[in-house]
Amino acid sequence: MLVTSVGAYGIYLAIVLGRAGGGPLAAVPYVSALLWTVGGAIVASIVLHIAVSTFSGAEAGRKDVRDREINRFGEYIGQSFVVIGGVAALLMAMAELDYFWIANVIYLGFVLSAVLGSVAKIVAYRRGFQEW
Amino acid sequence: MVKPTRVTNAIRTLRFAHGEMTQAELARRIGVTRQTIIAIEQGRYSPSLEMAFQIARVFSVGLDDVFQYPDGESEGVQ
Protein backbone atom coordinates (compact mmCIF):
# COMPACT_ATOMS: atom_id res chain seq x y z
CA MET A 1 0.00 0.00 0.00
CA LEU A 2 2.74 2.40 1.06
CA VAL A 3 5.02 1.44 -1.82
CA THR A 4 2.32 1.44 -4.50
CA SER A 5 0.73 4.73 -3.37
CA VAL A 6 4.02 6.58 -3.19
CA GLY A 7 5.24 4.99 -6.43
CA ALA A 8 2.05 5.84 -8.32
CA TYR A 9 2.02 9.40 -7.02
CA GLY A 10 5.68 9.82 -7.97
CA ILE A 11 4.92 8.64 -11.51
CA TYR A 12 1.90 10.95 -11.67
CA LEU A 13 3.94 13.97 -10.52
CA ALA A 14 6.69 13.16 -13.01
CA ILE A 15 4.15 12.95 -15.87
CA VAL A 16 2.30 16.14 -14.94
CA LEU A 17 5.43 18.17 -14.21
CA GLY A 18 7.01 16.81 -17.39
CA ARG A 19 4.01 17.89 -19.45
CA ALA A 20 4.01 21.34 -17.85
CA GLY A 21 7.55 22.01 -18.99
CA GLY A 22 7.77 25.32 -17.13
CA GLY A 23 4.33 26.50 -18.27
CA PRO A 24 1.33 27.02 -15.95
CA LEU A 25 0.52 23.79 -14.08
CA ALA A 26 -3.23 24.29 -14.16
CA ALA A 27 -3.22 24.12 -17.96
CA VAL A 28 -1.65 20.65 -18.00
CA PRO A 29 -3.94 17.74 -19.02
CA TYR A 30 -3.82 15.66 -15.85
CA VAL A 31 -7.04 13.59 -15.87
CA SER A 32 -5.77 10.59 -17.84
CA ALA A 33 -2.50 10.48 -15.85
CA LEU A 34 -4.42 10.65 -12.57
CA LEU A 35 -6.86 7.90 -13.50
CA TRP A 36 -4.14 5.62 -14.88
CA THR A 37 -1.87 6.00 -11.86
CA VAL A 38 -4.72 5.45 -9.39
CA GLY A 39 -5.88 2.38 -11.35
CA GLY A 40 -2.30 1.18 -11.67
CA ALA A 41 -1.72 1.56 -7.94
CA ILE A 42 -4.81 -0.53 -7.16
CA VAL A 43 -3.79 -3.29 -9.60
CA ALA A 44 -0.17 -3.20 -8.37
CA SER A 45 -1.19 -3.53 -4.72
CA ILE A 46 -3.44 -6.52 -5.54
CA VAL A 47 -0.68 -8.20 -7.57
CA LEU A 48 1.91 -7.47 -4.83
CA HIS A 49 -0.43 -8.85 -2.19
CA ILE A 50 -0.93 -12.08 -4.14
CA ALA A 51 2.81 -12.39 -4.82
CA VAL A 52 3.73 -11.84 -1.17
CA SER A 53 1.14 -14.35 0.09
CA THR A 54 2.27 -16.92 -2.48
CA PHE A 55 5.93 -16.73 -1.53
CA SER A 56 5.53 -16.49 2.23
CA GLY A 57 4.70 -19.33 4.58
CA ALA A 58 1.27 -20.78 5.17
CA GLU A 59 0.89 -18.92 8.45
CA ALA A 60 1.73 -15.49 7.05
CA GLY A 61 -1.61 -15.17 5.28
CA ARG A 62 -3.64 -15.76 8.41
CA LYS A 63 -5.16 -12.80 10.20
CA ASP A 64 -6.20 -12.76 13.82
CA VAL A 65 -7.80 -10.28 16.16
CA ARG A 66 -4.56 -8.33 16.63
CA ASP A 67 -4.11 -7.91 12.85
CA ARG A 68 -7.65 -6.62 12.58
CA GLU A 69 -7.14 -4.19 15.48
CA ILE A 70 -3.91 -2.87 13.94
CA ASN A 71 -5.62 -2.49 10.57
CA ARG A 72 -8.45 -0.53 12.18
CA PHE A 73 -5.97 1.62 14.11
CA GLY A 74 -4.01 2.44 10.92
CA GLU A 75 -7.13 3.26 8.92
CA TYR A 76 -8.33 5.55 11.71
CA ILE A 77 -5.02 7.45 11.76
CA GLY A 78 -4.93 7.71 7.95
CA GLN A 79 -8.51 8.95 7.84
CA SER A 80 -7.45 12.41 9.06
CA PHE A 81 -5.79 13.23 5.73
CA VAL A 82 -8.91 12.28 3.77
CA VAL A 83 -10.80 14.82 5.87
CA ILE A 84 -8.06 17.45 5.46
CA GLY A 85 -8.08 16.85 1.67
CA GLY A 86 -11.88 17.13 1.59
CA VAL A 87 -11.94 20.37 3.59
CA ALA A 88 -9.15 21.83 1.47
CA ALA A 89 -11.08 20.91 -1.71
CA LEU A 90 -14.24 22.46 -0.26
CA LEU A 91 -12.46 25.73 0.48
CA MET A 92 -10.78 25.73 -2.94
CA ALA A 93 -14.12 25.13 -4.67
CA MET A 94 -15.63 28.05 -2.73
CA ALA A 95 -12.70 30.21 -3.79
CA GLU A 96 -13.43 29.05 -7.37
CA LEU A 97 -9.92 27.82 -7.94
CA ASP A 98 -9.10 25.81 -11.04
CA TYR A 99 -10.40 22.23 -11.16
CA PHE A 100 -6.78 21.11 -11.51
CA TRP A 101 -5.93 22.21 -7.98
CA ILE A 102 -9.12 20.81 -6.46
CA ALA A 103 -8.59 17.38 -8.06
CA ASN A 104 -4.96 17.39 -7.05
CA VAL A 105 -5.51 18.37 -3.43
CA ILE A 106 -7.99 15.47 -3.09
CA TYR A 107 -5.53 13.06 -4.71
CA LEU A 108 -2.74 14.30 -2.44
CA GLY A 109 -5.05 13.78 0.55
CA PHE A 110 -5.65 10.16 -0.47
CA VAL A 111 -1.94 9.54 -0.96
CA LEU A 112 -0.99 11.10 2.39
CA SER A 113 -3.79 9.12 4.04
CA ALA A 114 -2.39 5.86 2.63
CA VAL A 115 1.16 6.80 3.63
CA LEU A 116 0.26 7.84 7.18
CA GLY A 117 -2.05 4.85 7.66
CA SER A 118 0.60 2.40 6.43
CA VAL A 119 3.34 3.94 8.57
CA ALA A 120 1.03 3.81 11.60
CA LYS A 121 0.38 0.10 10.95
CA ILE A 122 4.10 -0.66 10.63
CA VAL A 123 4.84 1.18 13.89
CA ALA A 124 1.91 -0.61 15.55
CA TYR A 125 3.28 -4.00 14.51
CA ARG A 126 6.78 -3.20 15.71
CA ARG A 127 6.13 -1.25 18.90
CA GLY A 128 2.54 -1.87 19.91
CA PHE A 129 -0.42 0.42 19.49
CA GLN A 130 -2.48 0.35 22.66
CA GLU A 131 -2.48 3.45 24.84
CA TRP A 132 -2.43 3.00 28.59
CA MET B 1 4.45 7.79 22.10
CA VAL B 2 2.79 4.51 23.04
CA LYS B 3 3.28 3.63 26.68
CA PRO B 4 4.04 -0.02 27.32
CA THR B 5 1.40 -1.85 29.28
CA ARG B 6 2.08 -2.52 32.96
CA VAL B 7 0.50 -5.92 32.67
CA THR B 8 3.19 -8.57 32.85
CA ASN B 9 2.81 -12.24 32.04
CA ALA B 10 4.39 -15.59 32.70
CA ILE B 11 3.50 -17.19 29.38
CA ARG B 12 7.12 -17.96 28.51
CA THR B 13 7.71 -19.70 31.82
CA LEU B 14 4.40 -21.55 31.57
CA ARG B 15 5.22 -22.74 28.07
CA PHE B 16 8.50 -24.23 29.26
CA ALA B 17 6.79 -25.81 32.25
CA HIS B 18 4.33 -27.46 29.87
CA GLY B 19 6.71 -29.62 27.92
CA GLU B 20 8.49 -26.70 26.24
CA MET B 21 5.40 -25.84 24.27
CA THR B 22 6.31 -23.74 21.24
CA GLN B 23 4.82 -20.32 20.53
CA ALA B 24 3.36 -21.83 17.37
CA GLU B 25 1.62 -24.59 19.33
CA LEU B 26 0.15 -22.13 21.83
CA ALA B 27 -0.95 -19.90 18.96
CA ARG B 28 -2.63 -22.84 17.22
CA ARG B 29 -4.49 -23.84 20.37
CA ILE B 30 -6.03 -20.44 20.96
CA GLY B 31 -6.49 -19.62 17.28
CA VAL B 32 -4.16 -16.64 16.80
CA THR B 33 -0.94 -16.10 14.87
CA ARG B 34 2.49 -16.78 16.36
CA GLN B 35 3.26 -13.06 16.02
CA THR B 36 0.46 -12.31 18.44
CA ILE B 37 1.91 -14.71 21.03
CA ILE B 38 5.33 -13.07 20.58
CA ALA B 39 3.79 -9.61 21.00
CA ILE B 40 1.93 -10.68 24.16
CA GLU B 41 5.06 -12.27 25.68
CA GLN B 42 7.04 -9.10 25.00
CA GLY B 43 4.34 -6.88 26.48
CA ARG B 44 3.65 -5.14 23.18
CA TYR B 45 0.07 -6.34 23.05
CA SER B 46 -2.57 -6.82 25.70
CA PRO B 47 -4.94 -9.57 24.69
CA SER B 48 -8.67 -9.34 25.19
CA LEU B 49 -10.10 -10.77 28.40
CA GLU B 50 -11.43 -13.72 26.42
CA MET B 51 -8.03 -14.50 24.88
CA ALA B 52 -6.45 -14.18 28.34
CA PHE B 53 -8.85 -16.82 29.68
CA GLN B 54 -8.12 -19.06 26.71
CA ILE B 55 -4.37 -18.84 27.40
CA ALA B 56 -4.94 -19.65 31.08
CA ARG B 57 -7.09 -22.63 30.09
CA VAL B 58 -4.37 -24.04 27.82
CA PHE B 59 -2.03 -24.13 30.84
CA SER B 60 -4.83 -25.22 33.23
CA VAL B 61 -4.07 -22.37 35.61
CA GLY B 62 -5.91 -19.30 36.83
CA LEU B 63 -5.77 -15.93 35.11
CA ASP B 64 -3.64 -14.55 37.96
CA ASP B 65 -0.99 -17.17 37.29
CA VAL B 66 -0.62 -16.02 33.70
CA PHE B 67 -1.06 -12.25 33.95
CA GLN B 68 0.05 -9.95 36.73
CA TYR B 69 -0.64 -6.30 37.32
CA PRO B 70 2.06 -4.98 39.64
CA ASP B 71 1.19 -2.50 42.36
CA GLY B 72 2.08 1.13 41.81
CA GLU B 73 0.45 4.47 41.36
CA SER B 74 -2.39 4.11 38.92
CA GLU B 75 -2.08 6.15 35.78
CA GLY B 76 -4.69 7.28 33.36
CA VAL B 77 -7.45 7.42 35.95
CA GLN B 78 -8.13 10.96 37.03
Image: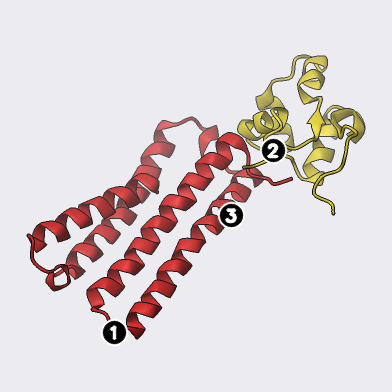
Chain colours: A red, B yellow
Crowd around label 1: few <14 · some 14–19 · many ≥20 (10 Å): few
Crowd around label 3: few <14 · some 14–19 · many ≥20 (10 Å): some
Q: Cα distance, mark 2 to mark 1? A: 49 Å
Mark 3 and mark 1 on one chain: yes
User: Element under label 3?
Assistant: helix
User: Element under label 2?
Assistant: loop
Q: Quadrant of residue A128?
A: top right
Residue A103 in the figure: left or right of residue B23: left
Residue A19 pos. (x, y %):
9, 61
Residue A26 in the figure: left or right of residue A61: left
Question: Disc 2, disc 3: CB below 8 Å?
Answer: no
* Residue A126 visible in rendering: yes
Q: Amino acid at mark 3?
A: Arg
**Sequence-first tag of 3 and 1:** 3
Q: Which residue is mark 3?
A: A72
Question: Nearer the viewer's eye, disc 2 or disc 1?
Answer: 1
Residue A79 in the figure: left or right of residue B60: left
Residue name at image x 48 percent, y 52 percent: A117
Q: Which residue is mark 2?
A: B45
Relative to B5, residue A102 above or below: below
Question: Nearer the viewer's eye, disc 3 or disc 1?
Answer: 1
Q: Which residue is mark 1?
A: A96
User: Element under label 1?
Assistant: loop
Residue name at image x 52 percent, y 47 percent: A120
Quadrant of the drawing holding the C terminus of chain A:
top right
